[in-house]
Image (spheres, grey):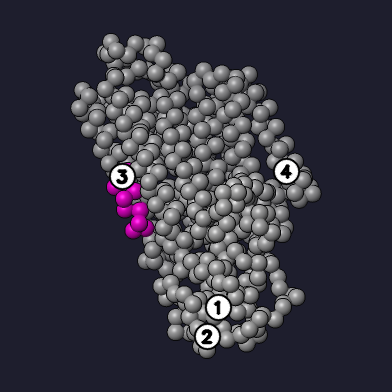
């Protein structure tokens, strides 16, 4: 077992067998438990507020996958039209994530949220709240790993309020969809003395996480490795059986949607591992993730790293699983900071265990409370400064646009796409300012008419009635709406000429 017990606090109000104490975790002073509860609530509420604010105030794109691996295929499922990325032509992705988002869009449709502002707000708000729930799961993971409720609450705050998790939180990406089942699954399955039922639920959550993102298989293998290392043979067998069932579900989903068992996994691994084509999207050195985290959150990353190292001896299983995930991603040539999102709450939980070890050295409640509040305050400062993040700090477009704000990138284009979709006379639209992959596609446009890329037909082709262009480049057209440096322009044409060769494939 990777849990080290400490002597019980002298506190007659909390007996060792108190039902409020987590299994395998020593009792603590009542005042500390209460402060831990307050700090946890503050972290969750503040984290939710930050996430929901950015969900409703950022129309930008970090990377095209957050649109064309989730929103766009889901829009096509619900509304019948949308651009198709190569992954959903060759079958390099399964339909679990688009299916989840399609469920949200379908719910929005039932509620009357059929305008992009409505259903996109619903989707982003959902992912924001998933991030908040993940912070709670981080607290639970810290508790079962040996941290007191006070220290575990600080660990949860390190995820709930840190700027990097806040930045990614509202985005409809597989990392965000799978992070909650990863953290809660490990919290349940790694808990000392977990019942058979708890282990089944925990392993099932990890299996679901793989369904949403294939790379989470590392956590499944890690769970089996930890159980075997603890010589919990029966539990390892149960976990293996449950995970095997979820593997069959993965294969069956591919069989039903792509016509071949495990088709998406085969195509994905062939593209990325066998052919190494992911490197065409850019390569980074081994230390990239550590360097970028240190750049994006300099003080907080150092604090989390130091506390996680302190907590390592008491949570070896969790530390080993986390380290394996970090190592395997660091060894891959193509790197994006978002790939680490599932590991960030694990590092925060480890930091909570490390803080618990540090608090033992301090004498008296005031000293322990001050140290813990200081950690939470550091996380809060990071979250409050999230709006200043640049692409350089996130490791994106480091050489092309290092000083540009990471927020609302291409937001003006997407808001003008929405505005164009509301025009009664729009019969086609061309976006002249940016490659189509860096737009919100039909998820934002929401009109079943042609949407042309920047290199599409010329204006005099009469294939479209409106263009999104730089202000001042209206030509003979009339400006309908403006957003920042861009304008939505109505061209001097009547009805559009039908385009029998229009392609729905994302260029």
- Mark 3 vs mark 2, foreground winner is 2
- Mark 4 vs mark 1, foreground winner is 1
Mark 3 or mark 1, which is nearer the start of the sequence? 3
Residue holding disc 3: 380
Q: Dots 4 and 3: beta carbons under 8 Å?
A: no
Q: Dots 2 and 1: beta carbons under 8 Å?
A: yes
User: Is 4 on the left or on the right of 212, as rendered?
Assistant: left
Residue holding disc 2: 477
Residue 196 place in picture, x, y as percent: 60, 19
- Tell me how far mark 2 sits from mark 4, CA to CA: 48 Å
**From where the camera sits, is residue 340 visible?**
no
SS at mark 3?
Answer: helix
- Tell me how far mark 2 sits from mark 1, CA to CA: 9 Å
Mark 1 or mark 2, which is nearer the start of the sequence? 1
Mark 1 or mark 4, which is nearer the start of the sequence? 4
Task: Give the quadrant of the C terminus.
Answer: bottom right
Q: Which residues are magenta?
A: 379-389
Residue 467, which numbered label?
Answer: 1
- Mark 2 vs mark 4, foreground winner is 2
């Amino acid at each position: 077992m990777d849990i080290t017990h400490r002597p019980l606090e002298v506190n007659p109000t909390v007996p060792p067998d108190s039902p409020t104490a987590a299994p395998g975790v020593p009792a603590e002073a009542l005042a500390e438990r209460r402060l831990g509860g307050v700090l946890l609530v503050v972290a969750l509420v503040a984290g939710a507020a930050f996430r929901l604010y950015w969900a409703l105030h950022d129309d930008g794109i970090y990377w095209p996958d957050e649109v064309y691996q989730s929103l766009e295929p889901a829009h096509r499922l619900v509304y019948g039209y949308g651009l198709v990325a190569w992954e959903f032509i060759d079958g390099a992705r399964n339909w679990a994530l688009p299916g989840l988002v399609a469920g949200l869009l379908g719910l929005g449709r039932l509620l009357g949220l059929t305008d992009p502002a409505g259903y996109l707000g619903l989707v982003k708000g959902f992912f924001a709240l998933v991030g908040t729930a993940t912070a709670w799961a981080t607290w639970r993971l810290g508790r079962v790993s040996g941290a007191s409720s006070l220290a575990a609450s600080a660990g949860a705050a390190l995820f709930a309020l840190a700027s990097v998790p806040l930045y990614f939180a509202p985005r409809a990406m597989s990392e965000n969809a799978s992070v909650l089942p990863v953290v809660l699954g490990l919290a349940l399955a790694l808990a000392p003395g977990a019942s058979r039922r708890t282990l089944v639920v925990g392993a099932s959550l990890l299996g679901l996480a793989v369904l949403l993102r294939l790379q989470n298989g590392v956590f499944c293998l890690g769970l089996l490795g930890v159980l075997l290392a603890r010589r919990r043979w029966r539990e390892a067998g149960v976990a293996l059986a449950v995970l095997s069932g979820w593997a069959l579900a993965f294969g069956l989903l591919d069989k039903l949607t792509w016509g071949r068992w495990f088709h998406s996994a085969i195509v994905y691994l062939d593209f990325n591992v066998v052919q190494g084509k992911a490197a065409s999207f850019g390569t980074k050195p081994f230390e990239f993730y550590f360097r970028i985290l240190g750049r994006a959150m300099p003080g907080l990353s150092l604090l989390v790293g130091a506390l996680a190292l302190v907590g390592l001896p008491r949570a070896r299983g969790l530390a080993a699983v986390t380290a394996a995930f970090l190592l395997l991603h660091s060894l891959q040539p193509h790197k994006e900071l978002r790939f680490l999102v599932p590991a960030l709450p694990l590092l925060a939980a480890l930091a909570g265990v490390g803080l618990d070890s540090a608090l033992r050295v301090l004498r008296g409640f005031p000293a322990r409370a001050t140290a813990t509040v200081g950690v939470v305050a550091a996380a809060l400062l990071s979250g409050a400064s999230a709006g200043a993040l640049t692409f350089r700090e996130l490791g994106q477009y480091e050489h092309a646009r290092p000083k540009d704000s990471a927020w609302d990138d291409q937001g003006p284009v997407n808001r003008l796409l929405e505005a164009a979709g509301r025009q009664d006379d729009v019969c086609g639209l061309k976006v002249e300012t940016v490659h189509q992959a860096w737009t919100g596609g039909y998820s934002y446009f929401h009109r079943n008419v042609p949407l042309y890329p920047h290199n599409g037909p010329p204006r005099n082709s009469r294939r479209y009635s409106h263009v999104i262009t730089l202000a001042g480049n209206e030509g003979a057209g009339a400006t309908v709406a403006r957003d920042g440096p861009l304008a939505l322009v109505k061209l001097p044409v009547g009805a559009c000429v039908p385009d029998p060769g229009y392609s729905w494939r994302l260029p």
